[in-house]
Amino acid sequence: MFVDYLKARVKGGDGGHGCVALRREKYVPRGGPAGGDGGRGGHVIFEADPKLGTLYDLKHRPNLTAKRGGNGGGNDCHGADGEDVIVKVPLGTVVSDEDGNQIADLTEPGQQWIAAKGGRGGFGNAHFATPTNKTPRYAQDGGPGEDRRLILELKMIADVGLVGLPNAGKSTLLSKLTAATPKIAPYPFTTLSPNLGVMEFEDGFRVTLADIPGLIEGASHGAGLGDRFLRHIERTGVLAHLVGDEEGTFDPEDMLYKHGLVCQELAAYSAALAAKRQILVVAKVDLAGGRDQVEAVCRAFRERGLEPLCVSSLTGEGLEGLRARLRERVQENSNTNCH
């Protein structure tokens, strides 16, 4: 099951209590305080794991608590620190507080963040000895562990996001450009959760693509699958916007309407998403009644200042050109970010 949003409670372990003890040793007639400190409570730590692709493992563990620290002992023995709880999360996990304020973003493999700190260990009575109070008979209790309620959101890390209406051909295109195997069927909403694929080039350059479930009119208000999956392309630098026509009519006005509809829903989600660079892809051109129909559609887009790429995942037409364009845009985006 694909889970990309959940709420969790995390609690660090309580600190161990300090000990009250007096030394009783032969040849040490006056003894002295010998109570050790309590151990620190365990932390709850989130760690980014590239092997995970969903928050599903945490769905049934909404409460995460670390072990408490050990109590101090006599003879200046300190209590053991509580064992930390390491929680694996997918790359791209964003952590927010209850008010929605972002407090962590785990984007690097192995990156760790302490979600809840363990309580401090209490001092034993040996800690409080002074020249005027050589045998204190009191110790300090351990502190409570941090207790927080957090919101975890997964935002996939990809170079390119594939967007478009349902049945535009996004999943089929992903399967042709990468080794991904998304579900493909001749009906809308076959993609119920985002899919990732990696497009590899001979020189080792890699482009990661994210296939987002299709948008429909009113998605920003919850229609269809809504816009909840658009968070997964917030990190992408480039959008490949697919416009297809499974009926084969390739009516220019209809294609322009479909393109505008998706752009409208992107803008309703966020201005930043609407402002991302797009590569317009006219898909499924093998279904057109003839090249005249395809040319009419391309001409209509060019009149709007857009330069479409025509592709067919079935015949392979235009796929190499699309691969080259995607690489070019991703490299341009990388260079811009570096400067």
Image (cartoon, helix red, strand yellow):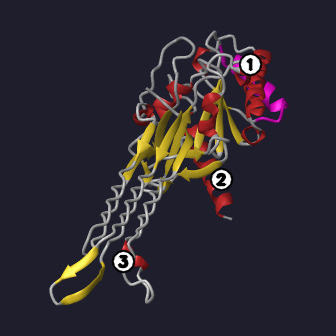
Q: Is residue 3 left or right of residue 80?
A: right
- Which amino acid type corresponds to the residue marked 1 in the rendered image? Gly
Label 3's element? helix
Look at the magenta stretch and give its main secondary structure. helix
Q: Which of 73/324 is in front?
A: 73
Q: Is residue 99 left or right of residue 175?
A: right
Q: Earlier in the sequence, mark 1 or mark 2?
A: 1
Report if residue 150 lies within the magenta region.
no
Label 1's element? loop
> What residue does disc 3 label?
126
Cα separation, mark 1 vs mark 3, equals 68 Å
**Residue that extends furthest to the left in the rendered view of this protein:** 26
Report if residue 305 lies within the magenta region.
yes
Q: Is residue 141 visible?
A: yes
Q: Earlier in the sequence, mark 2 or mark 3?
A: 3
> What residue does disc 1 label?
218
Viewer-side label of 2, 3: 3
Viewer-side label of 1, 3: 3
Question: Magenta residues?
Answer: 290-306
Q: Is residue 164 above or below residue 114?
A: above
Horizontal and vertical percent position of residue 65: 41, 45
Label 2's element? helix
Q: Mark number for residue 333?
A: 2
Place residue 295 in its image quadrant: top right
Q: Quadrant of the N terminus?
A: top left
- Which amino acid type corresponds to the residue marked 2 in the rendered image? Asn
Q: Is residue 33 above or below residue 273?
A: below
Mark 3 is surrounded, within 10 Å at the Cα level, by few (under 14), some (14 to 19) or many (20 or more) other residues, namely: many
Place residue 89 in its image quadrant: top left
**Residue that extends furthest to the right in the rendered view of this protein:** 303
Horizontal and vertical percent position of residue 292: 71, 18
Q: Residue at x 39, y 56 (%)?
A: 42
